[in-house]
Amino acid sequence: MAEHRTTNGNHENNAINELDKKIICALQGDFPLVAEPYKVLAEKAGVSEELFLERVKAMEEEKKIRKMGAVLRHREVGFSSNVLVAWKVDPERLDEVAKQMAASPSVSHCYDRTTAPDWPYNLYTMVHGHSREECERIVAGLAAETGVEERAMLYTKREWKKVSMRYFQES
């Protein structure tokens, strides 16, 4: 296997090089359910397991990759209701409230957005539940916990697309 190394193990700039692109591509698929999954992924990228893990750690430290984790197909495990909640949060409290809401195990996404003249909401959370009633209880709990009451709840009617992003894929 061909291996790529830099003189000191670090990359001189913040660009994604070809080796890192191969490693990112290997990480984006299904995680191998074997005793040595990183060895399998390293082989897919054409490098040793040691170099593969070294580069993954370096890319995390360099903030080129943020996280690795499982993607739960929520409907297949019984979470049949979900709601995007748009919250009107005092801008001075935005970071505090966002951190509180993001810490909730019932919140899968938490973003701040720019408001508009006819849309005053600046914080968005995605909440999943087993029923609409459960989502309502979760959202009411978040409101009570943060003191933020003004919100718009947008329930999913139909899911059109749900896939993870894939980067550096051949066309």
Image (cartoon, grey):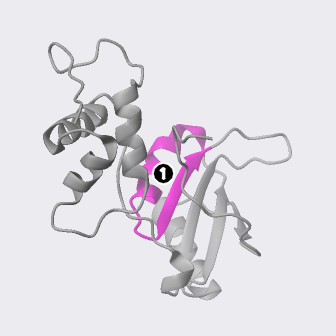
Residue 53 showing in the rendered view:
yes
The residue that appears at 86% across and 46% down in the rendered structure is 118
Q: In the rendered view, would you say 39 is above or below 62?
A: below
Magenta stretch holds residue 100: yes
**Which quadrant of the figure has residue 129?**
bottom right
The residue that appears at 56% across and 48% down in the rendered structure is 111
Q: What is the x, y in percent for residue 11? A: 28, 17
**Which quadrant of the figure has residue 163?**
bottom right
**Residues in magenta?**
90-112
**Which quadrant of the figure has residue 155?**
bottom right
Query: 70 left or right of 132?
Result: left
In this view of the protein, which residue sits in the foreground, 46 or 84?
Answer: 46
Q: Quadrant of the C terminus?
A: top right
Disc 1 packing (10 Å; few <14; some 14–19; many ≥20): many
Q: Which residue is mark 1?
A: 97
Magenta stretch holds residue 11: no
Q: What is the x, y in percent for residue 23? A: 34, 40
Q: What is the x, y in percent for residue 17? A: 39, 23
Q: Amino acid at mark 1?
A: Val
Q: Quadrant of the N terminus?
A: top left
At mark 1, the secondary structure is helix
In this view of the protein, which residue sits in the foreground, 50 or 14?
Answer: 50
In this view of the protein, which residue sits in the foreground, 58 or 122?
Answer: 58
Q: What is the x, y in percent for residue 158? A: 76, 74
The residue that appears at 58% across and 79% down in the rendered structure is 135
